[in-house]
């Protein structure tokens, strides 16, 4: 009779757990968090050794903004997950979604051991460790995989890890291996070139990108990177051509327009066509400050005497008042028109947004001097001298 009673109790507990667990999951999916919490806590009491209920509780607590309880529930789930590939996989997803990348990587190491046939696990481990800025762990995990030397995805991720450790030669070796193993994967070329650009190795970056062009001649990402490399070498006309090609491939991408806006004084022969290009972008994106700013800059670079540049710059400032360049350009225009109080307001706004731009302080000093604000002018001249002496960060 005692044995029968125990069986009945176990069956009742199992029924209670299943009902509460299912109801809790359904409430969690519908974002009914209070109900989810109640049901899942009941399920955890009924079956405290079930890791999946603790994982669901961790998700619930996280959504309820109770991080201490979420951490404890996730740790309980992890303690019960040894050898359980499915639970480890789900736990890694939870840690990734909550930005706990180091824990996600560690859990995936356990998952990889429990699911040796899942070849994608190693790459996910490296990605998590890179997200956590733990390149040493990424390298250990990558080079522990039995076939890592023959896997392009692992070699590329190892390249990123070595790059983060500031080991450029090792990074280059891995990036080159990835490209050699998988020459038709665009991202491998881009990652290698991007690392070179970050270290201002512009010539080598150009070689990588020109090689990539042979296979990917319609890639805006690669064209943009090529333009940046040429820009870094001050080969402005070639850079402009690359940026224009980028725009032709992806006309809604803002970066190539902004780069073109930086070099207008270096490419005077292109100003008419760039003016039309900026105007087209402005009309296509009426809620973006970019088109108005660049359209105005192009007109001013051609010594436009119309009122249009001023209205364009004011529109740019109104759409995004946190862009220092828009205020600066408007200040320069107002200063040229001798609207000095208004110019001062714009330069002050630009300085508040970007306090380390020497040009802004230079112009403020001039405007304050003409407004009779001698002390303020002196302060701005000193700030300008400090920035020019130290170099803008």
Image (cartoon, rainbow, N blue to C red):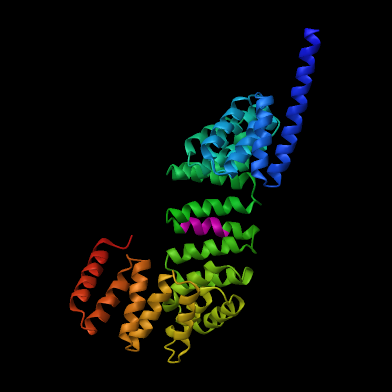
Q: In this view, which residue lies farthest toward the top?
A: 1
Q: Is residue 370 above or below residue 129?
A: below
**Residue 22: x %, y % from top left:** 75, 36
Q: Residue at x 74, y 38 (%)?
A: 23
Residue 216 forms part of the magenta stretch: no
**Residue 282: x %, y % from top left:** 56, 78
Relative depth, front residue between 54 and 218: 54
Image quarter hosting the N terminus: top right
Relative depth, front residue between 355 and 62: 62
The answer to whether residue 386 is left or right of residue 16 is left
Q: Residue at x 52, y 44 (%)?
A: 131
Report which quarter residue 3 is drawn in.
Answer: top right
Q: In this view, which residue lies farthest toward the bottom?
A: 306
**Residue 254: x %, y % from top left:** 55, 68
Q: Is residue 148 above or below residue 337?
A: above
The reply to whether residue 335 is in sight is yes
Q: Residue at x 61, y 29 (%)?
A: 77
Report which quarter residue 358 is drawn in.
Answer: bottom left
Residue 204 forms part of the magenta stretch: yes
Q: Residue at x 56, y 39 (%)?
A: 126
Image quarter hosting the C terminus: bottom left
Relative depth, front residue between 248 and 333: 333
**Residue 10: x %, y % from top left:** 76, 19
The reply to whether residue 122 is in sight is no
Q: How many marks?
A: 0
Magenta-colored span: 203-210
Q: Main secondary structure of the magenta part?
A: helix
């Amino acid at each position: 009779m005692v044995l029968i009673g125990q069986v009945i109790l176990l069956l009742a507990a199992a029924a209670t757990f299943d009902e509460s667990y299912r109801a809790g999951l359904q409430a969690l999916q519908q974002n009914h968090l209070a109900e989810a919490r109640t049901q899942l806590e009941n399920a955890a009491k009924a079956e405290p050794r079930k890791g999946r209920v603790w994982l669901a509780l961790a998700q619930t607590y996280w959504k309820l903004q109770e991080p201490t309880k979420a951490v404890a529930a996730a740790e309980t789930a992890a303690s019960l997950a040894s050898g359980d590939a499915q639970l480890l996989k789900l736990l890694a997803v939870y840690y990734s979604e909550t930005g706990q990348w180091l824990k996600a990587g560690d859990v995936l190491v356990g998952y990889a051991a429990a699911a040796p046939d899942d070849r994608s696990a190693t790459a996910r481990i490296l990605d998590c460790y890179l997200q956590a800025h733990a390149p040493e762990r990424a390298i250990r995990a990558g080079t522990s995989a039995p076939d890592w030397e023959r896997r392009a995805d692992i070699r590329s991720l190892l390249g990123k890890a070595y790059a983060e450790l500031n080991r450029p030669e090792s990074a280059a070796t891995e990036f080159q291996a990835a490209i050699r193993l998988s020459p038709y994967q665009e991202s491998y070329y881009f990652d290698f070139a991007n690392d070179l650009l970050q270290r201002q190795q512009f010539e080598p970056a150009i070689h990588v990108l020109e090689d990539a062009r042979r296979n990917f001649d319609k890639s805006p990402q690669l064209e943009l990177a090529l333009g940046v490399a040429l820009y870094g070498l001050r080969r402005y006309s070639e850079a402009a051509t690359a940026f224009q090609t980028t725009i032709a491939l992806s006309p809604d991408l803002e970066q190539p327009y902004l780069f073109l806006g930086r070099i207008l004084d270096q490419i005077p022969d292109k100003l008419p066509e760039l003016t039309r290009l900026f105007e087209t972008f402005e009309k296509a994106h009426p809620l973006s400050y970019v088109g108005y700013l660049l359209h105005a800059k192009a007109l001013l670079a051609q010594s436009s005497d119309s009122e249009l540049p001023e209205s364009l710059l004011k529109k740019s400032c109104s759409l995004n008042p946190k862009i220092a360049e828009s205020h600066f350009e408007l200040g320069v225009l107002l200063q040229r028109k001798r609207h000095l109080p208004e110019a001062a307001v714009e330069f002050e706004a630009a300085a508040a947004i970007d306090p380390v731009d020497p040009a802004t302080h230079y112009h403020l000093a001039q405007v304050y001097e003409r407004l009779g604000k001698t002390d303020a002018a002196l302060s701005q001249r000193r700030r300008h001298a400090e920035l020019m002496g130290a170099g803008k960060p």
